[in-house]
Image (cartoon, rainbow, N blue to C red):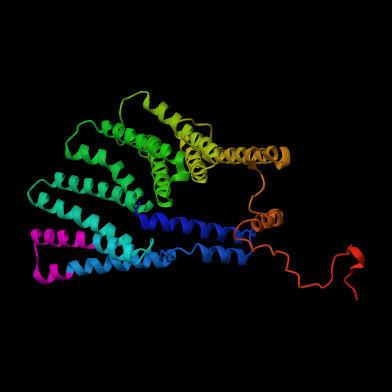
């Protein structure tokens, strides 16, 4: 990541953590204000609504700036290529030098929109001459590769999680685009390549996240996005077979049906195992994102497994699954609550940030921190005439 973001994100993390502690009642507003003053980030930030507006207005302004000379001069393909070649580095330079390094903008929308437009303009500048030359598929494939490389570069350099997500989407579509451009006659090969790509990127991001304490905040978000996107891609790829069976049931027609006999059982097993694996990994790693993925994919598996293993009507299966999960949650809470001091290991059934339960201890903990109000030392005593109480030779402090 670039140095301004890496240094500023540490201060942003500290101030946001102090804000959460203040809302939970763990520290007083004065202590949170002291943290905010001491760790005030130099980066300029805005809320999500302003960020979206700035991104939209920036994109509209730049597109209008390109469209104006294109319409006035009535440029053709070569003219548009030249315009894109001019505006692509210009957008990247303004965003990187003027907005990020000089103005210290931090995810304000404008600089993100300019960088995304720079990548898009460069991909179009490369694709238009190739398409104009008659190689349409090769031109779009080149644009696809540039978008993938640009999104990866933005994620690595600036820590944009949205760019990481776009890179994963482009990576997932690449095998199918290659199969179409190169006239592969084996569509199942593209799915095997997709599975291997997602598995490799998901494993790589998971191994990198084992050292999360040493990673900058933006890199952490990007790696988490890559891992969740890889898991979601594998899960959706597996579930495509469930939808294929659903289409066969509803329409009597199965798009992309094949004759491999072991594919359906394998997909059924993976549909059940992936949520369980995510749940186990989320518990072991104490990762909330993985737990949410396990919950959502588990719900999807309950809905789609009926196309592989049919126990009854869908309403009956959902009712039975809901009762089972409710009973499991109740048993887990009782099991955690019956442990020593109401916990087992690092897990507890009680919310950790509950002010009414932990407020006094947390205030005492905050009081010993360096940012807590300093303890008042003994005041210096003034001059006291007289000698000690046991003065020799009849000496005394009184007259």
In the rendered image, is residue 338 in sight? no
How far from the left and from the top, in percent, is residue 166?
Answer: 32, 49
* In this view, 134 is above or below 70: above
Horizontal side of 31 relative to 253 (left or right) equals: right
| Near-viewer residue (27 or 299) | 27
* Direction right: furthest residue: 394
Q: Is residue 135 magenta?
A: no
Residue at 49% x, 44% y is 296
Residue in the image at 52% along x and 64% along y: 38
At horizontal 26% and vertical 41% (from top left) the residue drawn is: 174
Which of the pair 241/379 is nearer the observer? 379
Q: Is residue 88 magenta?
A: yes
Q: What residue is at 20 percent from the left and 69 percent from the top?
A: 65
Say if 125 sits above or below 244 in the image: below
Q: Quadrant of residue 85?
A: bottom left
Q: Pick out the residue farthest to the left.
A: 133
Q: Quadrant of residue 158?
A: bottom left
Most extreme residue toward the top is 261
Q: Main secondary structure of the magenta part?
A: helix
Judge by depth and name the residue closer to the eye, 318 or 82: 82
The outermost residue toward the bottom is 399
334 lies left or right of 190: right
- Could you tell me which quadrant the C terminus lies in? bottom right
Q: From which residue to which does the magenta span run?
A: 68-91
In the rendered view, tell whether residue 376 sits above or below residue 179.
below
Along the horizontal axis of the image, is 85 left or right of 3?
left
Q: Tell me where residue 180 appears, x and y as whole percent.
A: 20, 39
Q: Residue 206 in the image: state x and y as whole percent.
A: 42, 38
Say if residue 33 shows up in the picture.
yes
Question: Residue 86: which quarter of the image?
Answer: bottom left
């Amino acid at each position: 990541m670039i140095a301004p973001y890496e240094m500023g994100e540490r201060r942003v993390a500290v101030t946001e953590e102090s804000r959460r502690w203040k809302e939970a009642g763990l520290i007083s507003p004065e202590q949170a204000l002291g943290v905010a003053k001491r760790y005030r980030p130099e980066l300029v930030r805005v809320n999500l609504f302003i960020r979206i507006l700035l991104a939209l207005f920036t994109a509209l302004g730049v597109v209008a700036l390109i469209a104006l000379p294109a319409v006035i001069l009535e440029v053709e393909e070569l003219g548009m290529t030249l315009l894109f070649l001019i505006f692509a580095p210009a957008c990247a330079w303004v965003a990187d030098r003027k907005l990020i390094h000089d103005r210290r903008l931090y995810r304000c929308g404008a600089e993100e929109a300019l960088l995304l437009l720079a990548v898009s303009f460069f991909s179009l500048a490369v694709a238009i001459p190739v398409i104009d030359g008659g190689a349409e598929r090769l031109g779009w494939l080149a644009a696809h590769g540039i978008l993938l490389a640009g999104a990866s570069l933005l994620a690595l350099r600036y820590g944009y999680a949205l760019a990481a997500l776009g890179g994963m989407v482009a990576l997932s579509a690449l095998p199918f685009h290659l199969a179409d451009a190169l006239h592969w006659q084996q569509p199942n090969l593209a799915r095997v390549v997709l599975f291997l790509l997602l598995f490799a990127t998901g494993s790589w991001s998971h191994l990198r996240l084992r050292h999360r304490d040493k990673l900058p905040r933006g890199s952490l978000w990007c790696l988490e996005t890559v891992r969740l996107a890889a898991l979601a891609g594998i899960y959706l790829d597996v579930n495509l077979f469930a939808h294929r069976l659903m289409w066969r049931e509803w329409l009597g027609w199965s798009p992309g049906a094949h004759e491999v006999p072991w594919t359906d059982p394998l997909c059924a097993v993976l549909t059940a195992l992936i949520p369980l694996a995510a749940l186990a990994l989320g518990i072991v790693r104490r990762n909330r994102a993985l737990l949410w993925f396990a919950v959502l994919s588990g719900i999807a598996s309950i809905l789609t497994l009926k196309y592989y293993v049919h126990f009854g009507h869908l309403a009956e299966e959902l009712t039975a699954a809901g009762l089972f999960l409710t009973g499991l949650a109740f048993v887990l809470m009782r099991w955690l609550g019956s442990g020593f001091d109401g916990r087992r290991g690092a897990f507890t059934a009680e919310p950790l940030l509950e002010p009414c339960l932990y407020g006094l201890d947390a205030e005492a903990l905050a009081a010993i921190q360096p940012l807590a109000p300093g303890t008042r030392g003994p005041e210096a005593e003034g001059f006291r005439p007289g000698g000690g109480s046991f003065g020799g030779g009849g000496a005394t402090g009184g007259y």
